[in-house]
Image (cartoon, rainbow, N blue to C red):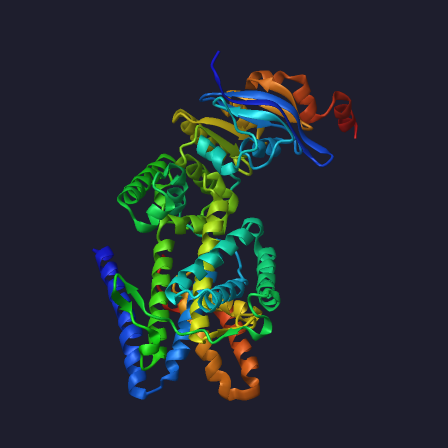
Amino acid sequence: MGLIIMQNKKILFTALFLIFVLVIIPSLIVMTSRWDLYYTLSSVALLAIASAGVWLTFYIGRINIGQGAFALVGGYVTAILITKAGFSFWLALPFSGLFAAFISVLIGLPILRLRGVYFAMITLVLTEVGRLSALALPITNGAKGISNIPLPGELSFAGITIIPDFASFENPRMAFYYLASVLMILCFATLYRLSNSRLGHLCRSMQQNEELTSSIGVNIAAIRIIIFALSSFMGGIGGSIFAVMSQSIYPSSFQVADSINFMLNCFLGGLGYVFGPMLGTVVLYFGWDLLFQTGKYQMLIYSSLLIISMLVLPNGLLSIRLSGRKKS
Amino acid sequence: MKKPLLQVNHLTKKFGGLTANHDISFQVFEQEILSVIGPNGAGKSTLFKLISSFLRTTSGEIIFDGNKISNLAPHIVARMGIVRTFQETTIFKNMTVRESVVVAHHIRAKANLFGYFLGTSTARAEEKEFARSADEILDFLQLSSLANEVASNLPQGHLRALGIAIGLASNPKILLLDEPFAGMNHDETMQMVELVRKVRDRGVTILLVEHDMAAVMRISDRIIVLNFGEKIAEGTPAEIQENEQVIEAYLGKEEDLVGLYTC
């Protein structure tokens, strides 16, 4: 009986959330004519996707400050495939994610043995390596980056248009908003399912004790690689859409500060909650913007608030709502 | 003569210049309780980690059920049926007792992880079976009343039992117990002895490493004694108690004893 009520509650929450994201927000934007919000909210959704990836590596007990590198890889792969190889965006998008995942497997094989601060430091360096490679490689066009990336074209299957050409929209930003938010929802649905499946339970075991986990016959090296690849795939997807949305990509598009923000999003939202990174991204992004009016004190207030929130709520913002209940 | 389940042949492990295990050979027979004892630093833990493949051997080999298992990855050795437990601090701290045991059934899973992700019928049937089996194991080890307790809240004795429960979940042929009686008082030790016997009666062969002589004498079918990385004796508890070399290793030579009495 209790289970059915919980099931129903979950379905209700999901439905409300979907309606809010896909119907209410767009209609509010139309009513207020704040078209710029489409762009802002799309960015938030993309950052949330990348943060979800970081959350996944936290899930196996690794602090990942390298997501910026994979977002950059995703962005550049998309930019190069579209502008130089003439790919359709719809093909370049999954390819960018897969390429980022592929790179992460190569890098992950040696570095995922490291734990704690050592892994964190290596990934931090990765972000910087990503930026410097983008500056140095001939194909990425150095500091000038790649600009004038065309908007996504039409996606059709057997002659039937599934997604129309973005340029044909009166407001392509709305199309980007839907693209980013739908992908974000898919991404968090995957995360939710994963954390409630055996794979998620194994990740939690690994987070708590890797030796014990391998003693029960779990190939921990394989799971680390799978999770890191999935994490980087999300980074690559986020970067890819970001590149086409801003129609340009530069070495400075994703830097160390972005990598740290992805990690902070997870911390702020709550590492123990699947939807932590989403909430964290929203709060952090708009929190920073709201503090804009404080002028030169912006950074001071922002960082003080972050420190306080981590002291008072070490388990993240979502722990407020759930503190009264038993943690599942 | 029974066929040995596990054979250790001329096993040597060196850490740099230090020889932790030197030329150790012995056999473990099915359904026996074999204890490895020795003073601190005798190389018991090293031997234990070599058998469970948490360390690589320097030379020598370990044969299990006719297959060479030395230097395989720990999870592969576990899958073959050699499962170790840890001392009580090594647990899944934030998981409940039941969750820990359910997740430890991983070895038995036939559906792959993607199948679990999608929730295929095999995967769901297996999860159901694991939950049932976990309850059975908890019942067997008298942990049922603590099933929904978070592991980090358990007292020491129950943590040990939980460690064994996690080990049993993977359906081992040999269970390696790491100091199951350490830090326990007499009553707790006796309870644990009973528990280990019960596990053996389920058909699991037990190899344990231990300090507590009284418990070891009581529980073991055979005992192996290590000193300074070498095997100095092997035999039944009665034989070991009589063995001069063992007495020497534990109590020092007679001259030393005299010296001890005079001061």
Whether residue A50 is situated above or below residue A230 in the rendered picture: below
State the residue at coordinates (59%, 70%).
A142
Where is residue B168 shown, x and y percent of the image? 41, 35
**Quadrant of residue A278 within the rendered picture:** bottom left
Say which quadrant the C terminus of chain B sits in: top right
Of B6 and B179, the residue lying toward us: B6
Q: Residue furthest left?
A: A1
Q: Position of residue B6 (x, y in %)?
A: 51, 23
Q: Could you tell me which residue is drawn at 57 percent across and 33 percent down?
A: B71
Residue B78 horizontal/vertical position (percent): 47, 34
Q: Nearer the viewer, residue A182 or B172?
A: A182
Q: Where does the image place residue B229, in percent across and percent down from the top left?
A: 67, 28
Against A11, is B148 above or below?
above
Q: Is residue B207 visible?
A: yes
Q: Residue at x 28, y 78 (%)?
A: A24
Left or right side of A32 for B47: right
Residue A269 visible here:
no
Which one is nearer the viewer's eye here, B169 or A24?
A24
**How many labels were placed on the picture?**
0
Q: Is residue A109 above or below residue B61?
A: below
Tell me if residue A164 comes above or below residue B198 in the rendering: below
Residue B235 lies in quadrant: top right
